[in-house]
Amino acid sequence: MYDDVVLALVDVAKKHGGYGDEVADAMKTCMSALRPLLADEDPALVTYFRKSAHTSGSRVLYYDGFLGVVFNEVKCGTIIPIHNHGLPEVVGVYSGSILYRTYNRLDNGDVPNVAELSLREERLMTDGDVSVLPEPPNDIHGLRALKDTLVMNIIPGALQPVRQYYYPSESIYIELPAGTKPADGGGW
């Protein structure tokens, strides 16, 4: 039954390129359907672990080389710095609470380590809330966990091997290999 719920989400995501409003709606349906199935079961028992630079751990529900559906465990107080993945994404809160920020990139990216950003959205996301992160160059986002939170992500493609971490107030970014994070905690 669990697999059927996740695969229904995967089917919708594949039909719509892995992101967009239809995928966001399917994620909401999936999270609602998973609640009774996982009520007495730790999600860690039905997924496999993936190391994460920013969270206490990621649990992969589905991955086929093109599309990934992942739970990320984010502890209260954790800040995931403003960054990009080089692809769009759908982000949902399965349980908990986050302050979520997304940004538009205003410059054309032709000057290395310079990025002019504007805040597109800042919102409180709680159980069942979903946000669609657009395609690059506007796939820039970050979050602060206000409670222990389980975030669900749909990632349509392979994450880039290099991440850009942004400092909006300084109009700059730094590049780091995926799996690492800025020593100073990054811009927020």
Image (cartoon, rainbow, N blue to C red):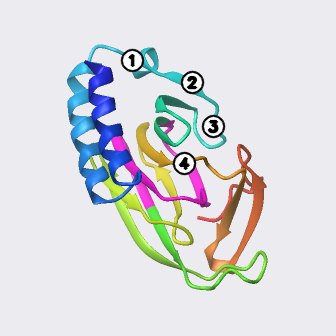
Give residue 182's position: percent from left, percent from top: 74, 55
> Which residue shows up at 42% across the image and 48% down it?
146
In the picture of the structure, the residue carrying the numbered disc 3 is 52
Q: For the residue labelled by badge 4, is the local secondary structure a helix, a strand or a loop?
A: loop
In the picture of the structure, the residue carrying the numbered disc 4 is 157
State whether residue 95 appears in this view.
no
**Residue 49's mark?**
2
In the picture of the structure, the residue carrying the numbered disc 1 is 42
Q: For the residue labelled by badge 3, is the local secondary structure a helix, a strand or a loop?
A: loop
The amino acid at mark 3 is: Ser
Q: For the residue labelled by badge 1, is the local secondary structure a helix, a strand or a loop?
A: loop
Contact (Cβ within 8 Å) of mark 4 with mark 1:
no
Give residue 129's position: percent from left, percent from top: 28, 50
Instruction: Give neighbour class at mark 3: few <14, some 14-19, many 20+ (Cα, 10 Å).
Output: some
Instruction: Give neighbour class at mark 1: few <14, some 14-19, many 20+ (Cα, 10 Å).
Output: few
* Residue 99 falls in image quadrant: bottom left
